[in-house]
Image: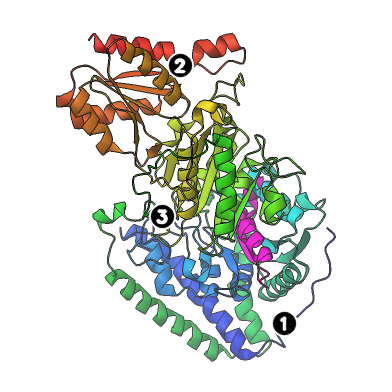
Amino acid sequence: MKNLEVPKIYSIKKTPKELLEKWFGLMTIGRAIDEKAPNYLKQAIGWSYHAPYAGHDGIQLAVGQHFEKNIDHIFLYYREMLTALSCGITPEEIILNGISKANDPSSGGRHMSNHFAKPEWNIHSVSSSTGNHTLHAVGVARAIKYYGEKSVAISGQGESSVSEGYVYEAISGADKEKLPVIFVIQDNGYGISVPKKDQTANRKVANNFTGFKNTRIIHCNGKDVFDSMNAMAEAKRYAIEESKPVILQANCVRMGSHSNSDDHLLYRSQAERNYVEEYDPLAKFRRLLIRYKRFTEEEIVALEESAKTELKAAHKAALKAPDPTPESIYDFVIPEPHKSKKYSEGLHNQDGENKKLITALNETLKAEFKYNPDTFIWGQDMANKDKGGIFNVSKGMQQEFGEKRVFNAPIAEDFIMGTANGMSRYNEKIRIVIEGAEFADYFWPAMEQYVDSSHDFWRSNGKFSPNVTVRLASGGYIGGGMYHSQNIEGSLVSIPGVRIVYPSFADDAAGLLRTAMRSKGMTMFMEPKALYNDPKAATSIPDDFEVPFGKARIRKEGTDITLLTYGNTTHLSLEAAKKLQDEGVSIELIDLRSLVPLDEETIIESVKKTNKVLVVHEDKIHGGFGGELSAIITEKAFEYLDAPVKRVGSTFTPVGFNRILEKAILPNAERIYNAAKELIEY
């Protein structure tokens, strides 16, 4: 979109003196901390990562001065110390973050230093994945627009972050949806040591987006206080009044190295270093204040001395603050889930009409959308005329709940996941369900956001958790081949902070989905798509059925072998168990339902009874979840075992498309039967 003229609201002559004094005070104390930070590392006090902001002073001051706490939402990147101060975070809080104290408002010492946040003010916690918070800003801007608030989401970042694909997804999505978000790109010419010419063809990276229909681009001098103030004022006015995104590119300089682990002497000439020193924004602002007689030299010196005094006091207070305790590492891994009073065991009387698994999911989604009007769902192929998801799980939902709550997302899995994280930041009432990908195998592009979201609750010291249910159509037995028939839970179970469930029957699918949607925190909901319409997975379902996390279901009691399974292989295992029963072998078949958390108690008690264990899952044996189950049993119930734990699963190959290949790769009832026979004869 064509750049429009920026109105000149602020100037050295017309800005009130008390405002100039405030600005100079913030810039002075900020620079003092910026220069002192490396000394903490040298003294072994902390601040092991510090990215100095000197050279970005004008734009960072301006962004913070235009942020309205508890109304606007802002996402700071690791070089935005002055922005944090300008937003209202105190010097003491900055130092608490730098030296990783327990009362650091950002993370309580859990996150890397120089990642400033105060979630209770909407200064959001972000990760170290460069620029990924642009997606969160877009997500929260979607909520701002939906709820009709006159505010903005602000994403701060360096120019090199724009090379990341998810930044393009964020800006493209904001442009399509016409969202009130400001992307502040602070261009200092380097990505660590990589010069801008190696990042992009355009001299100004914002111009990479000139073809975007609804996005306004504003350029300013990020070294100059007044140009930055005017640009930021116009960006915010435009984003709110027009409800459209703005890219604000601020040309800055980086006066020092990228961080205290970098040495810019290795890649910058003396002439270049002299040049950036000459453009010191703080020195320029100081000269202007005196040249235009807004302040005397004596007044400026007094303000500088005041900043030194303030820094000393903040330093002393921060050093006295407590350190985090070792025991606290287990706090805030994942929020406590919703607990059902009526269905504490996740069981019910099998009365009434049987419903297919796909019907169970569809009806539960609709019921929960009625139960909580702040519930949303999006994904690919979610809602277009009579279509509702690639498998029609969401069929009829857009017609019933409207296109603002049920809508299509672009084919961009990281965007789907990242904007869910962002939108859930708007308030705790919001619950989001996403189809993370059309098939589980396509979820890999979203893993960057999945990992980030998994540690949000822990990283923010319990101040924020994305309340998101990620639905994935999983598994094979449909002749789909690679990207359509594989399981990924084995790769996900090692990531803390997310519940992972994998139902086998319609009632469990309904109950686990309801519990996930009513719970705080993130749940990965794996759906065995081969069972969507299979009569063998159909069951009766009470209207309000709930299944607790971490509670397995004994599908068949027995005394000879404990068989642990979930998903598609539950039904194959039941088939094999019936054949074995006819031969006099008694199988105790446990449908895990929930992988994280895991019902270890039920598993161990069964092992004590049967003394032999067979683990069956559809995923590959090598690296599959069965290896973890085997290790748990070996560690906690070894004395009860009369044989090694045996596993059945897929071969260590991709899943082939030809049905002959698929049959050779995926487990079947015959393999389960044979494995059980070998185990009983051990």
| Disc 2 to disc 3, C-alpha distance | 35 Å
Image height of 638 relative to 669, above or below: below
Specify start and end residues of the magenta stretch as a single range. 134-163
- The residue located at (63%, 74%) in the rendering is 66
| Residue pointed to by mark 3 | 338
From this view, report whether residue 185 is shown above or below residue 503: below
Q: Is 288 contained in the magenta span? A: no
Q: Earlier in the sequence, mark 3 or mark 1?
A: 1
Residue 404, x across and y down, in percent: 70, 57
Quadrant of res 236: bottom right
Indicate the amino acid at tag 1.
Ser
Closer to the eye: label 1 or 2: 2
- The amino acid type found where label 2 is placed reads Pro
Q: Magenta-highlighted stretch: main secondary structure?
A: helix
Classify mark 1: helix, strand or loop: loop
Q: Give the residue number, with chain letter if any, for mark 1.
A: 11
Residue beneath disc 2: 667
